[in-house]
């Protein structure tokens, strides 16, 4: 079995405050090369923070990230800069992910210049090649972001990530802000690029349906922890954690005839500054077997009976709901 | 055959753009009916004109730069809303026709308590005293499923979560038991599990209060679960109308088909999505002929020249703005 | 005044008006430019400023006397405005109009350069504080608090008391060094918000160093408060210079500056008010014009209206 490209071990990120905001509270995951891990969660789950901390855009509070054999958090400035070529990120909001004062061409040239990836004479050709790869006309190089549509800006963001020829890309909700028809275009583009360039993705999203179309493995987060993780087909067919089940049933399906046994959770998502004691999900958990143990003891993420690759953090993962 | 509660005929709302980029014909001849007790879903992506349509109904469009063209008709219980005097219109807004907006964050006034904001509508339209209005506000909060309504009535919006704020918005809209509720993307800004709560709430309220709901959304899944009938909008026009089951069983318009193929589904295996090529045209320059023709896989010469009217299959219920309805033989096979 | 001076003055008016029109045309395609000119006072402000700049630059052309020329100190002193001396004469029988015109050079130069020093310092400090935050921010901002609490005039008087009357470049620098505190706060606030935007994170993810991030990404997008500060800042420096020159601590006579012209005329306010009135009017007009332009700029550069 090949060594994972990305190995995250007990990642913790707390933001200072009284009380501190426990955005990421002990997350471990691995991604094999060429695979896509879909990281799913609602607000307060910490999924975006995981992505940014892995890239060291924010300093972690604790934990270890090993990328391609290197300990990311232990690197000095120069090796970190070199590492940045191999790990990139695509952002959610097409309206804030591009510098409004720079043309598209300038935005794409910047990473090439920083890492000296092309002599000045070849810059224009490289930019054109990048634009072509994401399906944009070379004329776009002279335009400013406000002249582009959301989908086009997102493509530029992807081109920018590709410019340094990374091996791994964190896709932080890349299609959430786009219309359905454009969403499909960008998802297809990401899938094609993955094939072409042998990329590995950490695909962060709140939309389970979107993740279905691109992920090999799925991990579900709630209040800073992973509550379930499994190969994609397994988690959609037979989820074990009550939260995953509720999340799946809550997704509105475009099928009026589907008999919906919608599991509607009560109450709001707690703030990561005040996570409940014991299992963080227990106040909203609809599981019939919920008891005092859930209130006091936080369940560990462990393998379920059907497969060692299917993990769930629930005391009653084996019991039907 | 019951009379429609709300009838919109040939609504045109145009906006003047700066700098002579021309007029943006955001809503360009939209017609539909809303019957008592039903939920009508208006589906479309951004730029299709669905929000402008909903704002036009209550005449909330800012007069420059926007204006509703003469010839547009918006009838509520037989009265044309577009010709009402301001005082009469105000008597209807919030009272008989109420609206819920997308962003609960910005739709609530941050300096007033939620109780005050809910009570305001009761005071204005029903002439209740402050005490009675406050009691009513607590009643409404209970109705929308607030825990501890008697205490939460004095909360300020910033103390509440997104889902709670949306419930407050719904409470404000329903305090006068309106006959029509216009919900403009009421759950788009909310998390999935909270969305499920709000949709369930809307179901329950509609059953209890018997009101008609005009639900505007871009989410086909929401429409499938909530609406009785659907209107699909594209480029400022209605391109298809049908019952919900009819629409999902067999969409007639290629745009509807494209949307359904492009929506990611959790019951499908990992696969490529069918994208609609190109992008939504600008409202200042709608394409000639059928506005969807530049992106349509089936388009032929006629489509580029002549704009199709809404054509039906004969049963009157299901119509689509597409020449394929008359000439199904022109439909190209799926590649 | 001589005919050619009159003619030059007329040309100055026409040029100022043309400048406004040209600016309006050139920015018509720009959203911000249109918003700027939506204010009626903005055009007037630009016009007034253009006029004074043209007068300052072409001072020898629009005047018929030298500012230090004293044609007849007995018979022509403190004369009211007439066709020969269009703004009258001062106590030394110098032509007031040419003193005001040449004074514009000094005052505007001091105003512009002083503002430049202040804005540069303020931007740098604000950007560093806002970008790095934590202890760097705390230390810098406490420094700014102290600076804001200092009464500027007294600091300047102290400097003058210690070192005697300051040469002009030093004078400009001292004004600059005591005027940057407000700007730094504004810039810091803007930087705090800009640094959270995704494109800044993208630049860091790209491997850009802090310098690159600040100068290429943060500052260009935090330009609004800087530009507005600059416009209003010139006015502040102008007033400060006028006050100091009035107190006799600023620009040394006979070199004219609007402040020391007012000082020269102060003892004669009752008998020859125009000698202080006209330079005072000039200051007032320029400061009002700068405020009008600054206000219009603030609205034109409003980022909330940009993101459509």
Image (spheres, coloured by chain):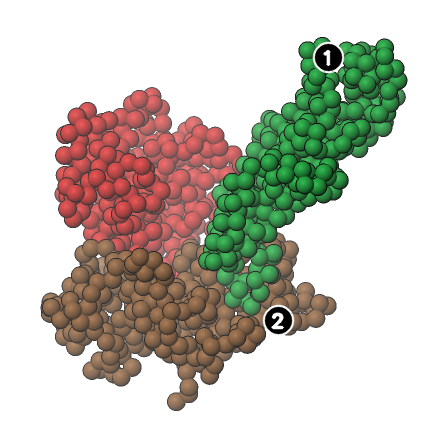
Chain colours: A brown, B red, C green
- Of residues A154 and B10, the one nearer the viewer is A154
Give the residue pinned by disc 1.
Answer: C272
Chain bearing mark 1: C
**Residue placed farthest to the front in the image?**
C162
Q: Is residue C130 above or below residue A209?
A: above
Q: Horizontal placement of B50 versus B157: left or right?
A: right
Q: Is residue B166 visible?
A: no
Instruction: Pinpoint residue B156: horizontal percent, then vertical percent.
Output: 27, 41
Q: Is residue B128 above or below residue B214?
A: above
Q: Is residue A312 above or below residue B100?
A: below
Tell me the element at label 2.
loop
Tell me the element at label 1.
loop
Q: Residue C236 appears in which quarter of the rendering? A: top right
- Of residues B46 and C103, the one nearer the viewer is C103
Q: Residue at 40% across / 77% down in the picture?
A: A64
Instruction: Pinpoint residue B59: horizontal percent, then vertical percent.
Output: 37, 31
Instruction: Pinpoint residue B277: horizontal percent, then vertical percent.
Output: 49, 59
Q: Is residue C142 visible?
A: yes
Q: Residue at 11% across / 68% down in the picture?
A: A292
- Of residues A293 and A128, the one nearer the viewer is A293
Give the residue pinned by disc 2.
Answer: A115
Q: Residue at 62% across / 27% down in the picture?
A: C288
Q: Are marks 2 and 1 on the same chain?
A: no
């Amino acid at each position: 079995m090949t060594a994972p490209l990305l190995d995250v071990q007990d990642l913790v990120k707390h933001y200072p405050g009284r009380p501190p905001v426990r955005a990421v509270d002990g997350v471990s995951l691995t991604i094999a090369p060429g695979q896509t891990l879909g990281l799913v969660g609602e607000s307060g789950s910490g999924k975006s923070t995981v992505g940014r901390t892995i890239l060291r855009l924010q300093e972690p509070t604790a934990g270890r990230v090993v990328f391609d054999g290197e300990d990311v958090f232990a690197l000095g400035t120069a090796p970190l800069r070199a590492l940045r070529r191999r790990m990139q990120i695509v952002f959610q909001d097409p309206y804030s992910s591009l510098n409004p004062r720079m043309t598209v061409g300038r935005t794409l040239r910047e990473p090439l210049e920083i890492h000296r990836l092309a002599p000045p004479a070849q810059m224009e050709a490289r930019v054109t090649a990048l634009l072509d790869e994401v399906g944009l006309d070379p004329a776009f190089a002279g335009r400013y972001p406000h002249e582009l549509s959301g989908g086009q800006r997102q493509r530029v963001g992807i081109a920018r990530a590709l410019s340094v020829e990374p091996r791994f890309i964190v896709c932080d909700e890349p299609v959430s802000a786009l219309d359905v028809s454009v969403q499909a275009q960008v998802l297809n583009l990401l899938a094609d690029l993955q094939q072409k360039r042998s990329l590995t993705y950490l695909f962060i999203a709140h939309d389970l349906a979107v993740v279905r179309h691109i992920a090999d493995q799925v991990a579900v987060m709630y209040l800073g922890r992973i509550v379930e993780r499994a190969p994609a087909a397994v988690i959609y067919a037979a989820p074990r954690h009550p939260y995953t089940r509720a999340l799946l049933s809550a997704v509105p399906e475009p099928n009026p005839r589907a008999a919906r046994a919608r599991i509607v959770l009560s109450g709001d998502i707690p703030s990561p500054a005040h996570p409940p004691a014991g299992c963080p999900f227990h106040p909203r958990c609809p599981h019939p077997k919920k008891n005092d143990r859930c209130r006091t003891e936080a369940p560990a993420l462990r393998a379920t009976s059907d497969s060692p690759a299917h993990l769930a953090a629930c005391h009653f993962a084996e019991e039907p709901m | 055959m019951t009379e429609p509660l709300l009838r919109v005929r040939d609504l045109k709302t145009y906006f003047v753009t700066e700098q002579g980029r021309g007029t943006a014909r955001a809503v360009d001849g939209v017609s539909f009916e809303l019957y008592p007790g039903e939920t009508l879903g208006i589906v479309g992506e951004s730029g299709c004109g669905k929000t402008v349509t909903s704002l036009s109904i209550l005449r909330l469009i800012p007069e420059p730069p926007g204006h509703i063209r003469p010839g547009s008709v918006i009838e509520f219980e037989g009265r044309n809303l577009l010709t009402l005097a301001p005082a009469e219109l105000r008597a209807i807004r919030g009272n008989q026709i109420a609206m819920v907006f997308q962003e609960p964050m910005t739709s609530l006034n941050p300096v007033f308590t939620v109780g005050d904001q809910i009570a305001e509508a009761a005071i204005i339209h029903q002439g209740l005293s402050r005490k009675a209005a406050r009691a009513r506000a607590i009643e409404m909060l209970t109705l929308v499923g607030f825990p501890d309504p008697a205490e939460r009535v004095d909360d300020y919006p910033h103390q509440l979560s997104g889902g709670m704020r949306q419930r407050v918005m719904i409470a404000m809209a329903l305090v006068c038991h309106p006959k029509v509720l216009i919900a403009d993307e009421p759950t788009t800004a909310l998390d999935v599990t909270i969305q499920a709560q709000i949709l369930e709430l809307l179901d329950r309220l509609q059953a209890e209060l018997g009101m008609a709901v005009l639900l505007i959304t871009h989410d086909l899944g929401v429409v499938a679960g909530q609406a009785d009938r659907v209107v699909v909008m594209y480029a400022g026009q209605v391109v298809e109308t049908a019952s919900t089951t009819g629409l999902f069983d067999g969409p007639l318009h290629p745009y509807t088909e494209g949307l359904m193929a492009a929506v990611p589904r959790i019951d499908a295996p990992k696969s490529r999505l069918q994208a609609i090529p190109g992008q939504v045209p600008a409202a200042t320059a709608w394409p000639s002929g059928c506005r969807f023709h530049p992106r349509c896989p089936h388009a032929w010469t006629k489509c580029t020249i002549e704009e199709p009217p809404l054509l039906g299959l004969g049963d009157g219920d299901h119509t689509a703005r597409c020449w394929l309805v008359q000439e199904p033989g022109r439909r190209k096979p799926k590649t | 005044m001589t005919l050619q001076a009159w003619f030059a003055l007329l040309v100055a008016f026409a040029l100022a008006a043309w400048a406004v029109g040209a600016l309006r045309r050139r920015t018509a395609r720009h959203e911000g430019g249109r918003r700027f000119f939506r204010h009626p006072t903005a055009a007037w402000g630009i016009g007034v400023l253009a006029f004074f700049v043209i007068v300052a630059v072409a001072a020898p052309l629009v005047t018929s006397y030298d500012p230090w020329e004293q044609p007849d100190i007995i018979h022509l002193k403190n004369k009211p405005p007439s066709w020969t001396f269009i703004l009258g004469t001062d106590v030394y029988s110098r032509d007031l109009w040419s003193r005001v015109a040449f004074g514009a050079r000094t005052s505007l130069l001091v105003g512009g350069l002083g503002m430049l020093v202040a804005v540069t310092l303020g931007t740098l400090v604000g950007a560093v504080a806002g970008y790095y935050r934590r202890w760097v921010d705390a230390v810098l901002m406490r420094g700014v608090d102290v600076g804001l609490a200092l009464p500027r005039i007294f600091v300047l008087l102290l400097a003058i008391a210690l070192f005697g009357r300051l040469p002009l470049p030093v004078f400009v620098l001292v004004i600059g060094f005591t005027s940057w505190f407000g700007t730094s706060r504004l810039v810091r606030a803007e930087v705090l918000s800009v640094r959270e935007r995704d494109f800044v994170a993208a630049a860091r993810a790209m491997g850009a160093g802090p310098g690159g991030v600040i100068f290429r990404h943060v500052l260009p997008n935090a330009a609004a408060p800087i530009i507005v500060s600059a416009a209003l800042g010139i006015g502040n420096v102008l007033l400060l210079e006028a006050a100091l020159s009035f107190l006799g601590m600023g620009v040394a006579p006979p070199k004219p500056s609007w402040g020391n012209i007012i000082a020269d005329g102060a003892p004669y306010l009752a008998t020859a008010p125009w000698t202080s009135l006209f330079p005072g009017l000039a200051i007032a007009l320029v400061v009002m014009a700068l405020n009008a332009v600054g206000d219009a700029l603030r609205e034109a550069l409003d980022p909330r209206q940009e993101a459509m």
